[in-house]
Amino acid sequence: MNVAALTIADVQSGLRNKTFSAVELATEALRFAEAENPKTNAYLTIANERALVAAAKVDAKLAAGDDPGPLAGVPVAVKDVIVTKNLRTTCASRLLENYIPPYDATAIERLEAAGGVILGKANCDEFAMGGSNENSAFGPVRNPVALDRVPGGSSGGSAAVVAQGTAVVSLGSDTGGSIRQPASFCGVVGVTPTYGRVSRYGLVAFASSLDHIGPFGKNVADCATVLKAIAGHDPMDSTSAHAPVADYAATLNAPVKGMKIGLPAEYFKDLSSETGDLIMKAVDVYKKLGCEIVDVSLPHTEYALATYYIICTAEASSNLARYDGVRYTARNTDANSLTSMYRDTRGDFFGAECKRRIMLGTYVLSHGYYDAYYLKAQKVRNLITQDFAQAFETVDALIAPVSPFPAFKLGEKMADPLAMYLADIYSIAGDLAGVPCMSVPCGKTASEGLPVGAQLLCNHFEEAKMFQLAQAYETESAAS
Ligand code: GLN
């Protein structure tokens, strides 16, 4: 069994035809993940027992003639910022190195209820803060496509396991591009659904008004299937939407002829020529498919980066206040007063990027600066959201780069946080507006053979249309 090449459809037919049982598949997937992990460091924890128990349940359902669910037996990796009951969840932080959550995130419950088999927890930037996975307290992830390069971040491990084949699909989180950018760097599909489409209950909070859970897969269909399984209202998350969940996989192959796709001028100003060329080739494919390509403008794009780094740091400084050495695991025990215990615990256990964000966030929320920074950023966020609303009055979707350049070398941007932040320039506006967006592989650079992702964005809750467009591209480019 070549576990590395499997898609969800392959797993389903393998189980149906009795080529393998779910337990056989899980056993082989666990062995392969264990053997391959030293190359990339993509898994922080491999969950042998949990995976085998879940797989045995699937086999029992199959034997009883019951429906084992749309993800039956599918080996899944989960970013280590999503809590899993009785399974270590570190957020790639020393602070939570030994944290064992007492409950499952809603997305995890739904994944397992659909028959998914959780193989383990994927490495990421500490508390999902970063764009290269180099902020993990447990070492960076290496890009399986080019081991001297970053896989992107913050969901670098979730993208790497799918590219490496050590999981069939995975879950990541996206606050400012953390699903789409690693998907683009590793050459897999990554989806950031509409804000509120997937419950955030059990997603350790970074910036609550921007945080999304979404899937990675080798192809569009796999992401559509996973999203359907985990989406929908959840009483445990008041920001989760009541909107009905469509059967995304059922409409994947509907024709896209006649759809209007906007090219936002602001997204093509500053990017590597090879990235630009590959995106324009994808645009040509859409023309061939009968889509109409129109120029559009999202005039407030230039403010997106500043807006994002004010709002996300403000929310992070508040969310991360809970790590005080009293609750959760890590604590500085040398302190001789409560205040010094708080201070020294946070000083000892948070990594540099988290500290930077806590300080920035505290500053923009502080008396005298709140109006100038935080309040103004909220107003600009509104303008950015309105840009998208206006564009979607005339177009069905937007196409743009995910990142201005392909995967960079490990260490290349670590000394310069601003250079790192600039890599997010095309991925953060989608999060600020809360619209669904995704990265679809659109080829490799001629010079170095590095994957590049094209970003598709649609209006709120139009995931079905977005998947349809992505599928049409995937089918057409595979055929040509
Ligand atoms: N790179 C962005 C940041 O560092 C995105 C992070 C994310 O989406 N979780 O904040």
Image (cartoon, rainbow, N blue to C red):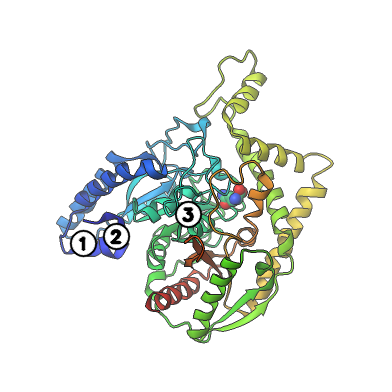
**Sequence-first tag of 2 and 3:** 2
Task: Say whether residue 108 is left or right of residue 96.
Answer: left
Q: Quadrant of the C terminus?
A: bottom left
Q: Which of marks 1 and 3 is in front?
A: 1
Amino acid at the residue labelled 2: Leu
- The kind of secondary structure element at disc 1 is helix
Circle 3 residue? 234
Task: In this rendered view, identify the residue nearer to me: 382 or 159.
Answer: 159
Circle 1 residue? 14
Question: What is the count of numbered marks?
Answer: 3
Q: Residue furthest front?
A: 447
- Position of residue 225 relative to residue 138, above or below, is below
- Dots 2 and 3: beta carbons under 8 Å? no
Residue 354: image location, x then y, percent: 62, 38
Q: Is residue 211 visible?
A: no
Task: Say whether residue 172 is left or right of residue 374.
Answer: left
**Sequence-first tag of 1 and 2:** 2
Task: In this rendered view, identify the residue nearer to me: 218 or 105.
Answer: 218
Circle 2 residue? 6
- Dots 1 and 2: beta carbons under 8 Å? yes
Distance of label 1 from label 2 (alpha carbons): 10 Å
Residue 151: image location, x then y, percent: 49, 51
Amino acid at the residue labelled 1: Gly
Residue 243: image location, x then y, percent: 51, 66
Q: Can residue 183 be seen in this view?
A: yes
